[in-house]
């Protein structure tokens, strides 16, 4: 009796990549490097790269973004390479996308960098929270682009129903089953529902953070460019087994573990989603609940892949995103990762000088980790920062925390609250940031204010 044939995987879709640069703009990385990053993204989405091209423009074409001659060239190259999909390394406006789809014809699908990243997030979101966040980002991206069959953005993160198409040829179930039947009104209703669900998640996280703060255990968030080695570092520090893969956005859902510092103190350490240049604004908005884990941390560990040719640019991209989520004020230790791959160890010392509070490490073999843990201990418990705050009496727990953990230099009481000037450990800066004030702002007369100098 003959054996049944072995199952075969679906053939990968073939992608043709297009890089574009506007001469008047100052990109974070070069056109060629950005296109190389797009290659990694496409490979992560399980696409087969069959060709690429670039164009530098003075100004975008109002209709097609790229020049009309370039459109014809891409159409010819896509036909020669038998491409199924064309991916632009920019975010196309709905008008540009519709016009390009008409020019290329119905046999070629057109997506941009944002759609590709959203698709990758849909692949890697596994928790209910991650699924909600990715679904919201996809719907908000899709709403202004709702035209014909969106099979190239049909991979959704979870949900029920039948199979749909996908960018990478791997059909997953989606929250909306027939894209052609979903009109703008229905999508808006879905967006509204997802936002309400995520608000519940956000409230739950806030309650959890409040409980955690009462325990006085500091929270450390690991941040960094995607694929810099954040999950590997978490595994090494916490002796855990978080997924590690040599691909972009291998992990999305935040993972928290407990670690012990050299002085005997304990801390919670969280691995967060990796950053990337041109990170879609929809994702930043949708992942607000997750990103609050960063903005409310007591300390950040910024992991930098020091062997990457664009390490400085990647670090700057992370810093820009931290500003966008209002987390730039949080104390930070920089971990220059993968020093074991450097051809000469002394190179690490030269690289360290370019980063403040930097420690050279290898998350893979553990070298430099004792120094990193000592730097964390110092930043959390030994470094004090000067601060002036105006705290209302309703937040009496914070007033008590300043007295217990800080050094009060000046204090003034009024009917509305307490103005305190003094020194607090670096790990507590984030907790007081909302009440920072340069001087007491009281409406009462001098008789209403009790001033103490300590």
Image (tube, rainbow, N blue to C red):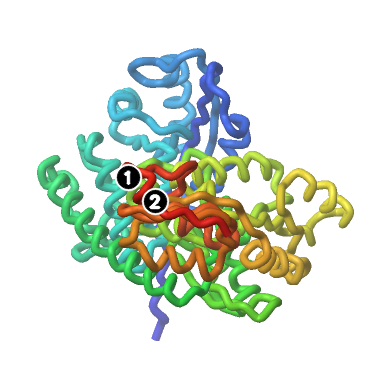
Q: Earlier in the sequence, mark 2 or mark 1?
A: 1
> In which quadrant will I find the N terminus?
bottom left
Which residue is depicted at the point 44% across and 38% down? Answer: 82
Which residue is depicted at the point 51% across and 49% down? Answer: 388
Q: Is residue 125 left or right of residue 246?
A: left
Residue corresponding to mark 1: 444
Secondary structure under tag 2 reads: loop
> In which quadrant will I find the C terminus?
bottom right
- The answer to which of 202 and 83 lies nearer the viewer is 202
- The answer to which of 216 and 132 lies nearer the viewer is 216
The picture quadrant where one finds residue 335 is: bottom right
CB-based contact (under 8 Å), mark 2 and mark 1? yes
Secondary structure under tag 1 reads: loop
- The answer to whether residue 12 shows anywhere in this view is no
Which residue is depicted at the point 55% across and 56% down? Answer: 453
Residue 95 in the image, given as x and y percentages of width and height: 28, 25
Residue corresponding to mark 2: 449
Residue 279 in the image, given as x and y percentages of width and height: 46, 43
- The answer to whether residue 94 shows anywhere in this view is yes
Mark 2 surroundings within 10 Å by alpha-carbon count, few (fewer than 14), some (14 through 19), many (20 or more): some
Q: Is residue 285 left or right of residue 213?
A: left
Residue 42 in the image, given as x and y percentages of width and height: 49, 47
* Number of the label disc, if any, that sits on residue 256: none
Q: Is residue 62 above or below residue 302?
A: above
Q: Is residue 66 above or below residue 47?
A: above
């Amino acid at each position: 009796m003959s054996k049944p044939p072995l199952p075969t995987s679906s053939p990968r879709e073939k992608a043709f990549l297009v890089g574009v640069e506007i001469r008047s703009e100052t990109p974070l990385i070069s056109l060629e490097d950005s296109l190389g990053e797009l290659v990694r993204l496409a490979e992560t989405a399980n696409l087969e790269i069959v060709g690429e091209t670039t164009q530098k423009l003075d100004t975008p074409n109002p209709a097609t973004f790229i020049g009309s001659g370039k459109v014809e060239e891409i159409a010819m190259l896509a036909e020669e390479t038998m491409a199924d999909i064309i991916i632009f390394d920019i975010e196309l406006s709905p008008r540009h996308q519709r016009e390009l789809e008409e020019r290329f014809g119905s046999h070629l699908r057109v997506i941009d960098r944002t759609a590709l990243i959203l698709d990758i997030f849909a692949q890697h979101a596994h928790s209910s929270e991650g699924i909600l966040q990715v679904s919201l980002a996809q719907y908000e991206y899709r709403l202004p682009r709702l035209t014909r069959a969106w099979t190239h953005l049909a991979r959704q993160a979870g949900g029920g129903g039948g199979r749909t198409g996908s960018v990478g040829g791997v059909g997953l179930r989606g929250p909306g089953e027939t894209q052609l039947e979903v009109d703008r009104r229905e999508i808006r209703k879905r967006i509204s529902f997802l936002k309400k669900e995520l608000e519940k998640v956000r409230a739950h996280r806030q309650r959890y953070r409040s409980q955690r703060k009462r325990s006085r255990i500091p929270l450390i968030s690991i941040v960094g460019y995607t694929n810099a080695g954040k999950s590997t570092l978490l595994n090494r520090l916490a002796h855990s087994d978080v997924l590690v893969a040599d691909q972009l956005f291998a992990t999305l859902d935040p993972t928290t573990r407990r670690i012990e510092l050299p002085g005997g103190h304990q801390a919670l350490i969280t691995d967060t989603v990796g950053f990337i240049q041109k990170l879609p604004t929809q994702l930043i908005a949708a992942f607000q609940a997750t990103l609050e884990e960063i903005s409310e941390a007591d300390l950040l560990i910024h992991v930098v892949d020091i062997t990457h040719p664009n390490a400085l640019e990647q670090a700057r991209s992370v810093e820009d995103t931290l500003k966008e989520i209002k987390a730039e004020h949080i104390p930070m230790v920089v971990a220059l990762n993968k020093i074991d791959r450097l051809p000469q160890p002394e190179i690490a010392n030269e690289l360290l000088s370019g980063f403040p509070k930097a420690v050279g490490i290898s998350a893979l073999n553990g070298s430099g980790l004792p120094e990193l843990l000592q730097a964390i201990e110092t930043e959390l418990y030994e470094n004090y920062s000067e601060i002036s705050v105006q705290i209302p009496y309703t937040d009496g727990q914070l007033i008590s925390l300043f007295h217990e953990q800080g050094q009060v230099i000046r204090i003034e009481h009024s009917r509305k609250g307490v103005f305190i000037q003094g020194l607090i450990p670096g790990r507590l800066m984030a907790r007081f940031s909302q009440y920072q004030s340069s001087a007491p702002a009281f409406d009462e007369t001098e008789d209403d204010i009790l001033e103490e100098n300590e």
